[in-house]
Each structure stands twice: as structure tokens, then as C-alpha cells.
């Protein structure tokens, strides 16, 4: 029997992770992206391997997803992760009022936390604000976004997946009975146009998911919500530093190589392909970042940038849940052969892929369980080494 | 306050099988934007056929290396202000010594397979970040921290290297720097890979690699150090035989 065929549109976190999952379940997978790996939201992710503490009070579904996936990713992708933990610090009375909710929220979501004194915190991280009132150690980490996605892509390739980068979906091929049966693509590197046929098309384009779904006359409710991040030198901390309060602007500082990255803000846009980095948001990162690490005030800026989150499920800005959703368009708009995965966070990429592959398998009547929890990923460099 | 400059972005273009030519794009920019922002706006608003690589936009991934006015740059952290002027021209070309996929995008396969061959570490103990933090200053307790290596694997050093231009088999600065960081004492099997014509001895000490490295690796110094490690190994063997 020939393998079931899948086309995945989008080579970001969800696309590469879904390729890995489906390839392990015996699919013949082709991934297309109009650019190279991770050239949209995924590549510009802040890089926090969330322990879930940020969401433990208001969004516990996301918090539990985060802690579970955090533990798994450390095991399967160590070559892309700085596993140094994280710290939540309180700097004022409002932060201290959040303390009780944080403790009970983390307990409810089985996130291990350890409250330490300001002196202990300063001994571990001498550059943090010395006026802190309390601190919690948490199992955060940080990761290199491109290398995390490449690890999944490399592992998918090993199991036969093909990556057609610089290959743009121009339209979906409909079979005349309201079902999607493939994608008309153009290879932007050669200007060659051709058809790709498959049993299922997975729309893994994140913030752009509405544009691909529209090609089949379907609708995906995704709210593209960019945020600005600023990198400074040097590496002031070894741990991910979080403000002990409800999620807000500029309340996370991450170490990465010789930098720290402060993030982020939250605004809405209509034009997705180019979002300017707003100077007033850069200023907020400087001010808010310097509250957590005073040295940032006079630090050298390394880079300023933005990424567009794909938010789903209603709510505005910070109020939106950070969970993910897989849409079977047969159920949502009676279009067969098309599945969309969007929402979520980088930390939950593997879980998003598992859910998507489950939906795909169920639709095609294939009985094959997810094994990605137990499969160590290949070195990200193998993506470039293995034949395509 | 943000300023506005009018510049001409001169971009090297080629689709598969074509010889490269330049296309010019007149555009308004803020001098405090990065070169990559200008390239990205060409694609977003002026010419959808442009191919280029980019991901993190803050110098951790190494995807956006290009030649800017004939010098290798990580375009995501290169201010337009530093490479042109109002009414000026900004020339952007793909990295050298790699096959061009199209326009500004190159195939980095040779670099990544060589880094695999020598087992270059992508994460390592924070104490080994020796340039800004001399190991002597570290508390033993800091040994617990793991961090991503300095090398972004961006390929700028390979593009800038005159020796890499003369031999496509040359391991190249980033790879030799990775071998040096691993150390021959800890990894004696590296000796036969780096002590070769296309290993450390291909280097002609031009030091271009260190000049363009955007991430503190200083490959030239590491290559020199690797040579002295090799000589020590070889001499050590001579004396042992004697």
C-alpha cells in the first residue's frame, strides 16, 4: 500500500513539527514555504521556553501545556536550548499582591516553584534589581528559535519528508466536489510553476492562516498580534527573568548567547508582510527592562525587532488565551481535505503537531499513535546535510 | 525623532541558471533601521520575486548574512546609517564561497556538514565564553550554566576568507574555530581532520574572518591557537617515539 500523502504549508514551528510527527506516522510529507525555514513569526520568537508560570493565574490550560512540553523539549532538543531555569521577581506592592495567586496557580498547574530571599536571588543573579522584594525559581529555559525548528525539520527529513523552500502556495487545487486535493505552487528561486497533489493539506501558516484558508473559501479566526523585542549587550543574567505580576509589556528578559532580549508589547495590525518596529515600543522595552535589570539603562542595543503572534479564541490582546486550535475545515465550513493549525506558542510546538497529526489520521482513517514524546531530535545541522 | 533618508538599494538578482545582475530600488528609509528591514520591504511592497534568508532579526540565528557594499554583514543588526548616507546607494549581494539558491539566498550545506564532521558544540558551559568572562573570574558554582555557543554559523567568515575562495574543500574559519573550541586534547580524533592541507595549513593569516565575525568568535586567533596545539601534539609524539 502506498503511503498517505500530506502537504504542509508553512515551515515555521508548527509546520516543521507536524512534518516530523506525520513522517513518523508513515506519511509521505512535503513542506512548502514561500521563504526559508522560520522566516515568519517563528524565527523571531522571543525564545522563552515557558514553564507556564506566566499563564498559571489567568490561562491555566496554556500553563499546563507549557510545563508539560518544556520538560519534553529539554529531553528531545538539548542542542537548541539553554536549560538554566528562570526567576520571577517582585519589585513593588502590586507585584507582592500577585504572589499568593502565583503560588496557588503554579500549584494547580503542577509547575515546581521555589521561593528564595532577595539575598539568595542576588547571589545567583547579581545584575537584577537589588530592590527586589521576593523571588521564585522556576524551570524556564531559553532556546534558539531557528535551531529548534531545524531540529524538527532535520528529523522529518530523515524519515523521508521533503522541504520545498522558497516555494509559494498560489492557490489550492479543488477537486470539483468541494474538497482540497493539492496546491498550485511557484518555486520563487526558479520561477517554475507546478502542482502538488496530496490526500490532505495542512495549513500551518500561523498568523497568515486566514490567507491560506481563504483560498478554499474557508475562514479562520486568527488575530495577528505583533510585539516588539529589543536585544542588549551584555548577557546580564543566566536565567530567564520574569516580573511577578499579570502578563504585561516588557516584563521578560531572556539571556541568549552574549545578549539579553527584553520583550514584549502587544498591538494589532492588518498588513502582515511587513510590520514596522515602533520606536515608542522600543522605548518601553528600555524602561521596563531596566526595572528588572538596572544595567539595561546604559547597555548597548544589539537589535530591535518584532514578531506577530497568531492569537485565537477571541479576547483582546493580553486577555486572549495562548492555547492553540486545530480546525478540520470539513467541520467548520464543509471543505474536505484541509486542516488548519494556529494559535499556541513556540513552547507547545510539539503538542500542536501531535494534535494536528491526530486530526489528520482520524480524517484519513489511519490508526497510528504519536511517538514524538520519546524520539530525540537530530542535530539541527542535519537539515542541511541530509538529501532533500 | 526619526529621520528620513532616500536611498537606492542595489540588489544582486539571479534565478536558477541565470548570471547575476543588479536591480535598483529607490526607497525612503529611517537611517536607524537595519539593512534587513530595507531588503524585507522590497519583498513586501516592491518586488515579490526577491529571495533572501532571515529568521531571528537579532543576531542569534545567523541566517541573514549578506555582502553589504562589499563587506560581509549580519544584515539584521547593521544600521543603514553605518553603511550609506542620505541620497546614497546601498549594494547588497549574496555571500561568496557558497552556491547561490537565488538572489541573496545561499546554500549553507557545506558549512553545516563540516561543523557536524568536527562535532562543533552548539551549546556549552557558560564558563567557556572566555572573551568577556575570563574563566578565572568564574565561581565554580557557575559551571552549572549552559549557553548557546558564540558561533552563529552565519558563514560571514567563509565568505570573507581569501583562502576559502581558492579551495572549496577548505574547512574554513568557523569550522576550525569550532575544532579549537573543542580542543585536540579532549578530542584527539580531530587531529587528522584539521592537520591537513585543507585544514589549518590552508589559512594564510589574512584575518578577514575575525574582521567580519559579528559574534565574538575571533576565528583567526583560534586557528593560530589550533596550529600551536597541533605542533605540540606532533612534537609530543616525536619525543614519545624517541
Image (spheres, grey):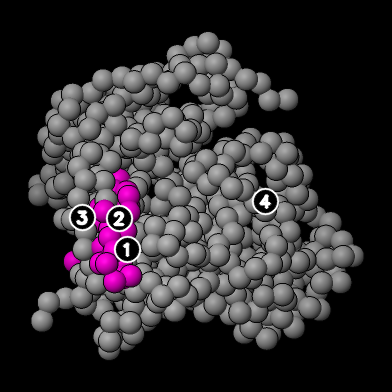
Chain of the residue displaying label 1? A
Q: Are marks 3 and 2 in contact (CB under 8 Å)?
A: no
Q: Position of residue A135 (x, y in %)?
A: 75, 68
Q: Are marks 3 and 4 in contact (CB under 8 Å)?
A: no
Point out the frontmost of discs 3 and 4: 3
For residue A267, which numbered disc appears in the image? 4
Chain of the residue displaying label 4? A
Q: Is residue A103 above or below residue B52?
A: below
Which residue lies under the disc numbered 2?
A32
Chain of the residue displaying label 3? A
Asked whether, in this view, residue B166 is left or right of residue A100, the answer is: left
Q: B221 and A224: which one is in front? A: A224
Asked whether, in this view, residue A315 is left or right of residue B241, the answer is: right
Residue A116 appears in the picture as rendered: yes
Mark 3 or mark 2, which has the lower sequence index? Answer: 2
- Magenta span: predominant SS is strand
Chain of the residue displaying label 2? A
Point out the frontmost of discs 3 and 2: 3
Q: Quadrant of the C terminus of chain A?
A: bottom left
Q: Are marks 2 and 1 in contact (CB under 8 Å)?
A: yes
Q: Position of residue A306 (x, y in %)?
A: 57, 46
Mark 3 or mark 4, which has the lower sequence index? Answer: 3
For residue A8, which numbered disc appears in the image? 1
Which residue lies under the disc numbered 3?
A195
Q: Is residue A6 above or below residue A205?
A: below
Q: Is residue A277 above or below residue B86?
A: below
Q: Which residues are magenta?
A: A160-184
For residue A103, which numbered disc appears in the image? none
Q: Residue at x 74, y 72 (%)?
A: A116
Q: Residue furthest top?
A: B87
Amino acid at each position: 500500500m502506498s503511503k498517505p500523502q500530506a502537504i504542509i504549508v508553512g515551515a515555521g514551528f508548527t509546520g516543521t513539527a507536524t512534518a516530523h510527527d506525520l513522517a513518523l506516522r508513515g506519511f509521505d510529507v512535503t513542506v512548502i514555504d514561500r521563504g526559508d525555514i522560520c522566516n515568519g513569526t517563528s524565527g523571531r520568537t522571543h525564545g522563552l521556553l515557558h514553564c507556564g508560570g506566566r499563564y498559571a493565574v489567568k490561562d491555566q490550560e496554556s500553563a499546563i501545556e507549557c510545563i508539560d512540553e518544556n520538560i519534553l523539549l529539554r529531553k528531545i532538543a538539548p542542542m537548541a536550548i539553554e536549560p538554566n531555569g528562570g526567576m520571577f521577581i517582585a519589585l513593588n506592592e502590586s507585584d507582592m499582591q500577585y504572589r499568593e495567586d502565583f503560588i496557588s496557580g503554579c500549584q494547580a498547574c503542577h509547575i515546581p516553584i521555589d521561593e528564595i530571599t532577595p539575598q539568595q536571588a542576588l547571589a545567583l543573579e547579581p545584575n537584577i534589581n537589588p530592590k527586589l522584594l521576593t523571588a521564585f525559581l522556576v524551570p524556564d529555559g531559553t532556546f534558539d528559535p531557528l535551531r529548534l525548528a531545524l531540529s524538527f525539520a532535520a528529523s522529518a527529513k530523515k524519515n523521508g519528508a521533503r522541504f520545498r523552500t522558497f516555494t509559494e502556495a498560489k492557490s489550492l487545487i479543488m477537486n470539483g466536489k468541494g474538497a482540497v486535493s493539492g496546491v498550485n505552487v511557484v518555486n520563487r528561486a526558479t520561477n517554475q510553476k507546478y502542482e502538488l497533489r496530496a490526500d490532505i493539506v495542512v495549513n500551518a501558516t500561523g498568523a497568515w492562516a486566514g490567507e491560506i484558508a481563504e483560498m478554499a473559501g474557508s475562514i479562520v479566526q486568527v488575530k495577528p498580534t505583533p510585539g516588539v523585542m529589543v536585544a542588549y549587550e551584555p548577557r546580564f543574567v543566566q536565567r530567564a527573568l520574569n516580573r511577578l505580576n499579570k502578563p504585561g509589556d516588557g516584563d521578560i528578559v531572556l539571556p541568549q548567547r552574549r545578549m539579553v532580549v527584553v520583550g514584549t508589547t502587544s498591538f494589532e495590525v492588518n498588513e502582515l508582510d511587513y510590520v514596522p518596529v515602533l520606536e515608542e515600543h522600543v522605548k518601553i522595552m528600555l524602561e521596563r527592562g531596566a526595572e528588572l535589570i538596572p544595567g539595561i539603562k546604559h547597555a548597548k542595543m544589539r537589535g530591535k525587532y518584532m514578531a506577530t503572534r497568531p492569537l485565537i479564541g477571541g479576547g483582546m490582546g493580553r486577555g486572549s488565551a495562548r492555547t492553540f486550535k486545530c480546525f478540520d475545515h470539513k467541520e467548520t465550513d464543509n471543505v474536505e481535505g484541509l486542516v488548519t493549525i494556529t494559535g499556541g506558542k513556540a513552547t507547545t510546538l510539539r503538542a500542536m503537531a501531535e494534535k494536528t497529526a491526530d486530526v489528520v489520521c482520524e480524517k484519513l482513517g489511519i490508526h497510528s499513535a504519536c511517538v514524538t514524546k520519546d524520539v530525540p531530535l537530530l542535530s539541527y545541522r542535519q537539515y542541511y546535510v541530509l538529501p532533500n | 525623532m526619526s529621520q528620513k533618508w532616500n536611498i537606492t538599494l542595489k540588489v544582486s538578482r539571479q534565478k536558477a541558471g541565470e548570471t547575476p545582475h543588479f536591480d535598483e530600488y529607490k526607497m525612503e528609509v529611517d537611517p536607524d533601521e537595519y539593512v534587513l528591514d530595507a531588503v524585507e520591504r522590497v519583498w513586501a511592497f516592491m518586488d515579490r520575486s526577491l529571495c533572501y534568508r532571515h529568521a531571528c532579526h537579532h543576531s542569534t540565528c545567523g541566517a541573514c548574512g549578506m555582502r553589504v557594499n562589499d563587506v560581509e554583514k549580519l544584515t539584521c543588526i547593521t544600521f543603514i546609517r553605518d553603511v550609506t548616507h542620505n541620497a546614497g546607494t546601498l549594494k547588497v549581494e549574496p555571500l561568496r564561497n557558497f552556491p547561490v539558491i537565488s538572489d541573496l539566498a545561499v546554500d549553507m550545506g557545506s558549512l553545516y556538514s563540516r561543523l557536524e564532521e568536527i562535532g562543533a558544540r552548539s551549546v556549552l558551559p557558560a564558563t567557556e565564553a572566555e572573551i568577556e568572562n575570563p574563566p578565572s573570574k568564574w565561581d565554580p558554582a557557575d559551571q552549572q550554566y549552559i549557553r548557546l555557543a558564540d558561533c552563529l554559523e552565519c558563514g560571514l567568515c567563509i565568505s570573507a576568507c581569501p583562502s576559502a575562495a581558492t579551495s572549496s574543500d577548505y574547512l574554513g574559519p568557523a569550522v576550525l574555530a569550532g575544532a579549537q573550541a573543542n580542543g585536540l586534547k579532549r578530542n584527539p580524533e580531530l587531529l587528522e581532520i584539521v592537520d591537513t592541507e585543507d585544514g589549518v595549513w590552508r589559512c594564510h593569516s589574512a584575518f578577514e574572518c575575525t574582521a567580519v565575525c559579528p559574534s565574538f568568535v575571533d576565528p583567526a586567533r583560534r586557528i593560530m591557537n589550533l596550529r600551536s596545539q597541533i605542533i605540540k601534539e606532533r612534537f609530543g609524539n616525536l619525543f614519545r617515539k624517541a
